[in-house]
Structures are given as C-alpha cells and as structure tokens.
Amino acid sequence: MVYDSAAKKTVLFSGFIDPPGGPFYAHDTWEYDGVSGTWTLISPDLPDAAPGGYPDVGAIAYDSARNRRYAFNGWILPGDIGAWHLRTFQWDGTQWVRIFPADDPVYRNPGMYTGGAGIAYHEGRQMVIWNNGAYRFTDPIQVTWSFDGAAWKLLSYSDGPPRSAGGTIAYDSARNAIVQFGGSGPFGFSPPDTWELVDADRVEIVRQPQHRAVVVGQPVQFSVVAKGAPPIGSFRWRKNGVNLNDGGVISGAETGILKINATNFVHVGQYDVVMTNDCGTATSAKANLNIVAKFGDGDIDSDVDLADADHLTECLQGPDAPRPAGCEAFDFDGDADVDSLDAAAFQIAFGN
C-alpha cells in the first residue's frame, strides 16, 4: 500500500484472501479517499503477462519524482508451480500496463524471482528498492535491486540482509536510508532483526554557491563544497543551464571553483554546478551574478546622489520580489531583488 501525493489518495494493490475453498492472492487495485473516507475499486485485475500463468505475490510503489505508480508482481508459470517470476506494471491513469524495463531481472537472470520481496521508494535516489524475496515457497533469496523507471540495476547479491521473504521495508527520509525488519528465512525461520541500506556516499552539497554582484571589469568567483564517495568524478558549471568551458576570462569550469577574471555585462545570469560520482548526481542551487557600472548609480552619471536616492525608492520592492528592470545598480548583494539590505548598502555608497 502506498500514498500517491499527486492524487492525494492511498492505493492498495494485491493481498492474500482465504475464503472457503482455498486461499489465493488477489491482484485488484483500490484507492482510498481520506476526505470522504471511502474505498473505490479502480482495477479488478492485471493484464495476463504470461500465457497460461496467473499472478501471485504482488507489491506496489509510488515514484513521487516521476508521478508514477508501479506494480511488481510474482507470476506463476504453467508447470512451474511454486516459483515466482517478476513482472513490472505501470499505471496509465485508468489501468495497469505491463512495461519491459532494461535489465529486467527475469530476463537478465531467470533464476531471480520476486515472491515476498520488500519494496520501497527511495526519495533520495529517486528509485524503487527491491530487497530479497523467494525463489520458491521454501527457498528465500539474498539480493537487492533498484529500479529508476527505465531500468533495473543489481546493487547487491550477497552482502545485504540474510536470505528472507516477506520482510517489511520503508524509506527513512531523515537519514536517507532504507530500513528492513523481519522476514521468513530458510525453513520458515523468521529472524527478528533490523537492517539498513544507508545512502551515505552519494554527492551531497555542504555549501551552495552564493549570489555575487561586482562592478564591470572586476573578477568574480563561485564555489561549491560537496561531500560523497571519492572521487567526485566531475564538476560542470553552467550559466543559465548551458555548460561552461575554460577559455578567455573563464577558468575552473570543471572544478569546485568557477572564476571569471574580468567580468563584462555578457556574464550576467544564473550559475549552478552539476556534480557526479559513482553513486549519483547532484545539482546546486542557482546563484545570480549582477554586474553594474557603479553601485548605487541608477542614472549612470558616475556619481551616487539624490537623483539616485529617488530612483532607489522606485526600485525598492522587498525580499524575494523580482528586481525591476533598470534597478541593477541597487542590487548590491546580487540576489535579484532590491530590499532593505541593499538600501543600507546604498547609504554607504551615497555621495561617492
């Protein structure tokens, strides 16, 4: 069961039913509206993903980054009773549709099955984590996979939690970790242990690039501080979303410090940096670069006087309000607004 934050509905998929005549796994899908307090059946079935087979153990995940619901279902094939084969489905708004991701475990290794696997969405990595499961009813496996909406990737084969099926897992957003508890091991033994998949090695930005404002012709630099599994394989600075390269007055475009040795008005814009290591990619916040002929000189007559004070009054909008056109000279801190901090800096510049 998952919560779809875009639809504002709780979604229930699959489950075990034990009516008179024998138990079976349901593969219907329901939505719960917490406002009205009602359940609604939105899908009674899954498409037949294996000729002659039928769906068994299932799980669901909600990908909040892509606004997608995924169903992962074990499928029992004819003549192979007791073995679960992976099938992946995506909700198209009205029904489940089977999809065929790259490196689907069932094609990469037909010995990998999904019965009783723990499924959770990892918001930090923006991917679904699938842990352990069962090859057959009495043979749990030890394996961890990830699914990013396009392809499956094997993360661990033998160094994770012990072989188990039916364990419960969840994502801890405060610590960026997947937590697993319990599960049935070989011969039905259920160890009451807790395991974590801690994502401590991805790129994490410690200090963001800061806004800058300079007089034309002066040098300026942007810097970023990041941590993660070494090495951070690449830095790529961008201006307005376009990659920068070293050359001319620009240097450090592929390092943690970007330098512009002699600014010109063509350098005005928003700067950010994309960093990558083996565990993923992180993009910094955007930092503004404001370039002026003279700070406080709104009428560009080479002095800061009462006429400029009147102009400042027209430009003063407050924090985070977009800076009006023609007010660049009053944005002393380069944060794309004209507020009380800039007014205080103007008082220092007045008369010069």
Image (tube, rainbow, N blue to C red):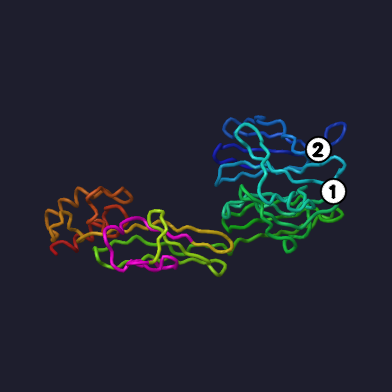
Bin the neighbour count of mark 2 within 10 Å (Cα to Cα): few under 14, some 14-19, many 20 and up: some
Q: Is residue 260 one of those drawn in magenta? A: yes
**Rendering quarter of residue 90:** top right
The amino acid beneath tag 1 is Phe
* Residue for point 70% across, 56% down: 144
Of residue 27 and residue 272, the one placed in the foreground of this image is: 272
Query: Disc 1 marks which residue?
Result: 137
* Helix, strand or loop status at disc 2: loop
Which is nearer the N-term, disc 1 or disc 2? Answer: 2
Q: How far across and down, in percent of the image, does residue 327 sit?
A: 23, 52
Label 1 to label 2: alpha-carbon separation: 17 Å
Q: Where is the N terminus found, in terms of image quarters?
A: top right
Q: Which residue is mark 2?
A: 53
Q: Does residue 58 lie above or below 259 as drawn?
A: above
Q: Is residue 146 left or right of residue 230?
A: right
Q: Position of residue 160 (x, y in %)?
A: 72, 61
Magenta range is: 247-274
Location of the C terminus by quadrant is bottom left
Counting from the top left corner in percent of width and height, residue 262 is at 28, 67
- The tag on residue 301 is none
Left or right, residue 30 beside residue 50: left
In contact (CB < 8 Å): disc 1 and disc 2: no
Residue 171 falls within the magenta-colored stretch: no
Number of other residues with Cα within 10 Å of mark 1, as a class: few under 14, some 14 to 19, many 20 or more: some
Q: Residue at x 19, y 50 (%)?
A: 313
Q: Secondary structure at mark 1?
A: loop
Residue 117, position in %: x, y? Answer: 74, 50
